[in-house]
Image (cartoon, rainbow, N blue to C red):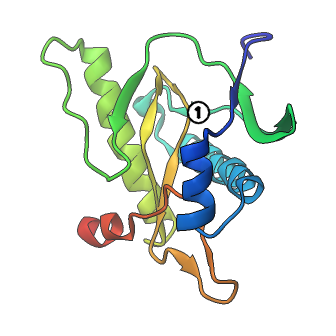
Amino acid sequence: MHGDKWVLNTYNQKAKNSISETMKSTVENHCRKQVQMHAVARHLAKKFERNAPTKFGECFKYNRCYYTMFDGEHATVEEFVPGSFAKYVNKNGNCVPVPEDATQDLKDLFLKAQTLVHYSYVVTDHKLMLLDIQGSEFTLYDPEIATEEIMDKEHREIYFCCGNCYSLVIAAFQ
């Protein structure tokens, strides 16, 4: 933990409209699904770390994410991650190009991020894929998850949240 610095995520009116009109959901439900998605990403990263060979070295991790209310608004809060931001894999599954002047350590981070995406796909029997791999060195945040099926047909509800619109990513990965 890095002390008492936290990031509070609330939604502007455009995002609220998208959540309610496009996704037919509530901001509260969306926030709770954000927390759920973060917990799944955290679990997959921990599982990967337990199964990675020792020679793989340091593995990625996600801190916890919490649901809260702030000034009467639904929100999420997570520990602040210090350092320089880097995006390794986009939410559409495309790998971000490694900068030409990247050090070997940075190149390794990009490869490890791609490995984590592939691992999430394999370990879930091709049902979901951890995407939008970004953060500061080995601490990641704001994940997205693509699922093979976008909607829980029984409850007519989107799995996870608005970012889960990439079932095509899984089809393309196969």
Q: Which residue is mark 1?
A: 61
Which quadrant is home to the N terminus? Answer: top right
Residue 159 spot, x, y in % from top left: 60, 69
Left or right: residue 33 versus residue 100 is right
Q: Residue furthest left?
A: 100
Is residue 63 shown to the viewer in this render? yes
Residue pictured at 57% horizontal, 65% vertical:
21
Pick the front one: 126 or 160 = 160
Q: In this picture, is 9 found above or below 27?
A: above
Residue 108 spot, x, y in % from top left: 30, 26
Q: Residue furthest bottom?
A: 154
SS at circle 1: strand
State the image quarter where residue 141 is shown: top right
Which quadrant is home to the C terminus? Answer: bottom left
Residue pictured at 75% horizontal, 39% vertical:
75
Residue pictured at 63% horizontal, 44% vertical:
42
